Structure formats: structure tokens, C-alpha cells
């Protein structure tokens, strides 16, 4: 595993990568260095995932997943420096949006601002009962700039998203579950084990199949149904010629567990 200043990378199980935001002294707030390092990680595993088939994103500690942008670092920034920093953030958020591997967010605590935007950019998320969520940017004279105005309404609906963004209004884990931001609420001592169980189950499926299915869902939801169906067919057809497709069918007929190679 590479060494980072603001992140900890680990492999808690075969084929599973865990990315941990590691600035607990400031509630894992997103600073320039963390933005740069997240960009490096997402780019690396997008282009060369190696044996990794699923990724878990979480934070250090039991207080916060990520408190959003580090406002102490931003204090006194020139306009030019602010824009340059935000461009770094933009690059890793776009990398998250295009990330080919399944990405699960383990929300171990509060997720505000850019922290919530990371949760929304993941494929799905599990969280602890005491976690609170908010896009607080309008209280600071700015607005969500990491996909929040696009991913939040896609999760909770446009009218509710407008209310939450305009008011900078926090909401609870229970509301996050009801509205579709979270898929599951887990007790703190069970959060990572539940995420890991899910990641291992995904990793046991055909890795190419999962990646193509993700691509079809992601791109299909951005267009009309007819085009979306063609996107699905194109993704499906790419799997027909793979070794994994032959292995899956052979394993079924031989009544054994398939051994997928990602080929």
C-alpha cells in the first residue's frame, strides 16, 4: 500500500480496498492535500485496479466521516487560490463519478458539505445511527460544488433537495435512510463488518459483470429509456466473449462455485 499524509489504504479482505480519510483531529475535513491524494487513488484504481474488485470509503474515528472543506485552511485564501484548490476537488469528484469499481461509503459519523457529497458520489452507503448530514454551503455564502446540487436531488427528489440546500438544513441518519441517501443503518461496532460482508459478496461475483452493470446504470440513468436500453445491451455484449462468462456458465452446470479471473 502506498503511503499518504491524509489517507490510510488497506486491504481488509481479498479483492477489497479500504480508503480511510485520516484527519480525525479536524473531523477528517477535506484540505488541499486530501483532495490531491484522493485524486491519485481514484485515478490509480480506475486505470489499474489489479486484484481490487470493490472499494470501501470511510473515516477515522467515531465522530465524523468528513466535516467538509477545511475552513481554517481556506481562511484568508485569495480568490485565485480558492479556485485553484476547488479545481483539485473537482478532479477527484469527477474521478469518483467515473470510478469503474463498486464504491461503498461507510459513514462512521457526521457528513457535512463535501463529506456528504462524497457519500452521494458513492454507489451506495451504510451509516451509523447518530450520523448527521447536511450541505451547509449556503450558510457560508457559497454553494455545493462537489456534485451536491446534482446527486442530492437524484437521491432524495428535487423539491426536498432544494429545501435542504437552500436552508443548509441538517438531517438525521433515519431521514437519510428514508430518503435514499443511506441504504442501511448499522450500529457503530457493526458498520465496517457489514460493509465488508457486502464488499466480499460483490467481489465474489464476476468483476467484469459488476463493472459493466455499474456502467449501464450510471450512464443509462442520464438519458432516455430507449438509449439506456442500448447502453445496457452494449455493456451486456462486451461480457459474451469473456473467460468469466464461460466460467460462470460452466460452474453452474458443474454445480460448483465459479472462480472468476476478471478476464
Image: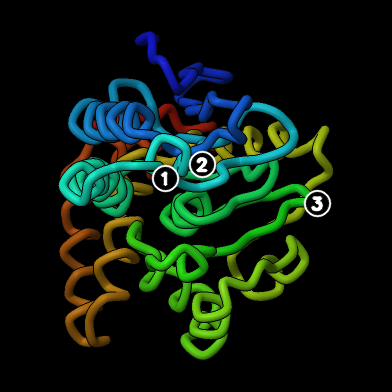
Q: Position of residue 200 (x, y in %)?
A: 57, 33
In the rendered view of the protein, which quadrant contains the C terminus?
Answer: top left
Query: Left or right: 93 with respect to 127?
Result: left
> What crowding class fits label 1: few (fewer than 14 Cα within 10 Å), some (14-19), or many (20 or more)?
many
Q: Is residue 69 above or below residue 22?
A: below
Q: Secondary structure at mark 3?
A: loop
> What crowding class fits label 3: few (fewer than 14 Cα within 10 Å), some (14-19), or many (20 or more)?
some
- Residue visible at 34% across and 42% down? 76
Query: Does residue 180 appear in this view?
Result: yes
Q: Position of residue 37 (x, y in %)?
A: 32, 26
Query: Left or right: 23 with respect to 37?
Result: right
For label 2, the residue is: 202
Tag 3–tag 2 contact (CB < 8 Å): no
Q: Nearer the viewer, mark 1 or mark 2?
A: 1
In the rendered view of the protein, which quadrant contains the N terminus?
Answer: top left
For label 1, the residue is: 102
Circle on res. 130: 3
Using the image as rendered, state which of residue 96 and residue 23 is in the foreground. Answer: 23
Q: Position of residue 204 (x, y in %)?
A: 50, 34
Q: Nearer the viewer, mark 3 or mark 2?
A: 3
Q: Secondary structure at mark 1?
A: loop
- Which residue sits furthest bottom? 159
Query: Left or right: 129 with respect to 245?
Result: right
- Residue visible at 78% across and 47% down? 186
Q: Secondary structure at mark 2?
A: helix
Tag 1–tag 2 contact (CB < 8 Å): yes
- Residue visible at 38% across and 48% down? 210
Tag 1–tag 3 contact (CB < 8 Å): no
Using the image as rendered, state which of residue 252 and residue 90 is in the foreground. Answer: 90
Q: Nearer the viewer, mark 1 or mark 3?
A: 3
Amino acid at each position: 500500500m502506498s503511503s499518504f499524509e491524509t489517507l490510510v489504504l488497506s486491504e481488509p479482505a481479498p479483492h477489497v480496498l479500504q480508503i480511510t480519510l485520516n484527519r480525525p483531529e479536524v473531523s477528517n475535513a477535506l484540505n488541499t492535500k486530501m483532495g490531491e491524494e484522493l485524486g491519485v487513488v481514484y485515478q490509480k484504481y480506475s486505470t489499474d485496479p489489479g486484484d481490487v474488485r470493490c472499494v470501501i470509503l470511510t473515516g477515522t474515528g467515531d465522530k465524523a466521516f468528513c466535516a467538509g472543506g477545511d475552513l481554517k485552511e481556506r481562511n484568508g485564501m485569495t480568490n485565485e487560490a480558492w479556485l485553484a484548490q476547488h479545481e483539485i476537488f473537482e478532479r477527484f469528484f469527477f474521478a469518483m463519478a467515473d470510478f469503474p469499481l463498486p464504491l461503498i461509503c461507510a459513514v462512521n459519523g457526521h457528513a457535512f458539505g463535501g463529506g456528504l457529497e462524497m457519500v452521494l458520489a458513492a454507489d451506495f452507503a451504510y451509516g451509523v445511527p447518530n450520523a448527521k448530514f447536511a450541505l451547509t454551503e449556503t450558510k457560508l455564502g457559497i454553494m455545493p460544488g462537489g456534485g451536491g446540487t446534482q446527486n442530492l436531488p437524484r437521491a432524495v427528489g428535487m423539491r426536498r433537495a432544494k429545501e435542504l440546500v437552500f436552508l443548509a438544513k441538517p438531517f438525521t441518519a433515519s431521514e437519510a435512510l428514508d430518503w435514499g441517501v443511506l441504504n442501511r443503518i448499522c450500529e457503530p461496532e457493526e458498520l465496517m463488518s457489514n460493509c465488508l460482508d457486502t464488499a466480499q459478496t460483490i467481489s465474489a461475483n464476476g468483476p467484469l459483470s459488476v463493472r459493466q452493470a455499474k456502467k449501464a446504470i450510471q450512464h443509462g440513468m442520464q438519458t432516455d429509456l430507449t438509449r439506456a436500453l442500448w447502453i445496457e445491451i452494449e455493456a451486456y455484449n462486451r461480457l459474451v466473449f469473456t473467460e468469466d462468462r464461460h466460467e460462470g456458465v460452466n460452474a453452474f452446470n458443474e454445480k460448483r462455485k465459479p472462480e472468476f479471473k476478471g478476464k
